[in-house]
Amino acid sequence: MARIDIAMELKKPMKHLLFAMALGCSFLYANDQKEYTLEPMVVYGDKLGRSLHTLPQSVGILDEIRLQTEVPLNANSLLDRFANTYTGVESDSPIVIRGVGNDSVAPAGFDRSNGLASVFYDQAPLSLSRLDYFKPITWDAKELSLFRGPVSTSYGPYSLIGAVIIDYNEPNFSHDGRIGLSYSSFNTQEMAITQNLPLIPDKLAIRLNAQTHVSDGTVDNITIPTDNWDDSETNEFRGQFLWQPLGTNEFTVEGFVDYVKTNTLPFYYNVETSALDLFERKNTANVTEETKANTSLSYVKTTWELDDSWTFESISSFNYFDAHDLTDFDLSALPLVEDKSFTEENRFDQEFRWHYKNRDTNFLIGTYYQYQYFEFGFDGNVLPGLGLPLKISSSTVTRVETVALFGEASQQINDCVNIEAGLRLNYDERLTRNTNIRDSAGGRLVDREQNLNLLPRASITLSVNDTLNIGALVSRGYRSGGVSSVLLQSNVTAYDPEFAWNYETFLRYRADDGLLNIHGNFYYIDWRNQQVSTTLPFGFPGIDDVIVNTGKSRLYGAELESWWELNKSFEVYAAVGYQFTEFIDFQTGGQNFTGDRFTNAPRWNWALGGTLWLTPQCFASSTLTWQDQTYSTLGQNNVSRLEERLLLSAKLGITRNRWTVYIFGENLLDRDYAINRFLSFGQRVGQPGLPRTVGVGIELGW
């Protein structure tokens, strides 16, 4: 597609509606521009409860006001607002931080028992399988915080490269509630509702949330044929509770139950040929693909304020995930490979913390336990159209137990110097049983991995003056080893743990009135024994992927983010990230990837946006993001090349009292871009990004 000037792209009928609404709003009210200050922003995801300005880690935040003026209602689509963070490959590392996916630096086949980045609802971790099928929602969220770089000391398993934490509004003792409805392109309909219910004044309250998403999708199948090939329906319910038996927050028990289900595959790949462009969105599969997936998350947190300095916390969570899929693995019109698969995951996490805080000292100590059960099964027919199909099946069962002792401390030495230290003693035991059957023959491998590791972190912060902090940070990240299986080639391989040392310097500027903030981090990561997934020679991508350990890799880069509230009417923000990734020593299966950069690791990305209150009742927000070109599949650098992305989203609304009406759009420039490409049975296949979407919405509160 030829490049089109942005100004020309915006000459669409929608612009006349935007202009008319803006003109009408400008005559409603005059805006009061009195001087004011902003309080420091507290990072709810930080276990020590510190403000954003004082954190040495590279952290990005979207607060509740910002979340309400953004267009997307899910965390994945908001990641490109941050430096060096963006949406990756759906169903296989959908979240990418510093060039590393939450599953792997390259697609990791079917194993979801061992990740690199975690997502939390409040302080409950989501299962890795859930992230592949369901995007974390931000409806009724009060903050989304992003931690970049190893945070294994604080968050334990599956956080070598970072974490995303979504904090939701707690129940309160009012009858407040709100409902949101929207309709947009491709017959996409969304509804979300929140209702707060006090049951016992000052002691017991509940908060109910429900959300549904239905869409016809953007892909048609030309083989079967079928319109709306990727139509979708997802429903989520979350019920929260707050119990204060003493009528105060001295002793509280809070938690939630969250349940989601869908009938939608998390991915749809289309064949790319000289006669069939990827962005025509035509699917050629000869199997009617189906899925049934559901997941639940239960969470309970008990907080006891022992005195003015000491607090005890108990945090328990349980994840359940179940999915059954029928897919056309060769993705073509020919009956080559079809399969049925299932995934089941159960995970229990328990953490106890003792937290001490006074004017100069802030520390906690804690214990952690995790049990995880993960099972993936696959039954496939190869060449079913010949009448004598080859039957293949595979099943992998993984059980993981983790026990840890950890501590974190922040000490103010004097007015200019603060030191921080953390240490985690982590023991995990991983038992994997894999069975591969090809026709009637097959084999089984049982492997047990045990690991004991120390995961330290330390930093020093120097206060140059009341507005400027600088400092340095060092931390160690870790991910355990395991076993990966290769289906068609009937191969099972064990792989070792991996480690990463992270070195950073940072700068934090916060103006006296808090209206201007500038944050910068420069990092270098030395990654040893790195786990990478690669397709074996003559293998089928996605089926014959094996996880191996590279000799060494390195990452370095920088993140610069700023936001400026010029007055109560206008806020702007900007982010720019640079990242360099390289396999220093990586040879496997007769292939040499030394010198290659990571998949889905663009060198540059940036975001620019803001919110303008034209009057106290009328707002306009917009975000423009750009991501450099990259590639998605190891060993297929040219075939899997991904275009650069320039995406524009906007939202314009009128709000009065407790109602809001708005229009919105995403990818308003209608840029074509792919989020994944690879070779499958000699043909190039890919997954296109979403085209231009425009819609209208309304919210009503009470």
Image (cartoon, rainbow, N blue to C red):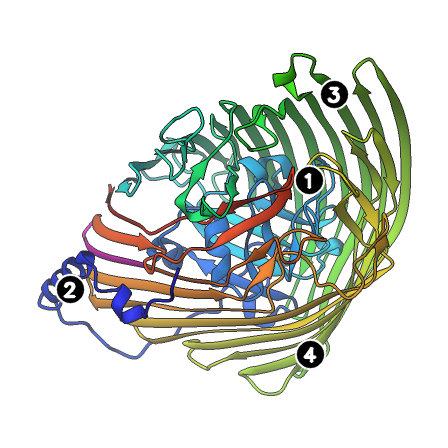
In percent of width and height, residue 536 lies at 79, 42
Residue for point 90% across, 33% down: 448
Circle 2 sits in a helix, a strand or a loop, which is it? helix
Q: Specify which label sits upstream in the sequence, 2 or 4.
A: 2
Q: Specify which label sits upstream in the sequence, 4 or 3.
A: 3
- The answer to the question of whether label 3 and label 2 lie on touching residues, with beta carbons closer than 8 A, is no
Pointer 3 residue: 393
Indicate which label's residue lies in the foreground, 3 or 2.
3
Pointer 2 residue: 19
> Observer-nearest residue: 489 or 165?
489
Q: Where is 482 relative to 322, above or below?
A: below
Q: Residue furthest bottom?
A: 464
Quarter of the image for the C terminus: give it: top left
Q: Is residue 182 visible?
A: yes
Please provide the residue range marked out in magenta. Answer: 650-658
- The answer to the question of whether label 4 and label 1 lie on touching residues, with beta carbons closer than 8 A, is no
Residue for point 34% across, 33% down: 216
- The answer to the question of whether label 3 and label 1 lie on touching residues, with beta carbons closer than 8 A, is no
Indicate which label's residue lies in the foreground, 4 or 1.
1
Q: Residue 471 carries which label?
A: 4
Circle 4 sits in a helix, a strand or a loop, which is it? strand
| Mark 3 and mark 2: Cα distance apart in space | 59 Å
Amino acid identity at mark 2? Phe
> Observer-nearest residue: 553 or 221?
221
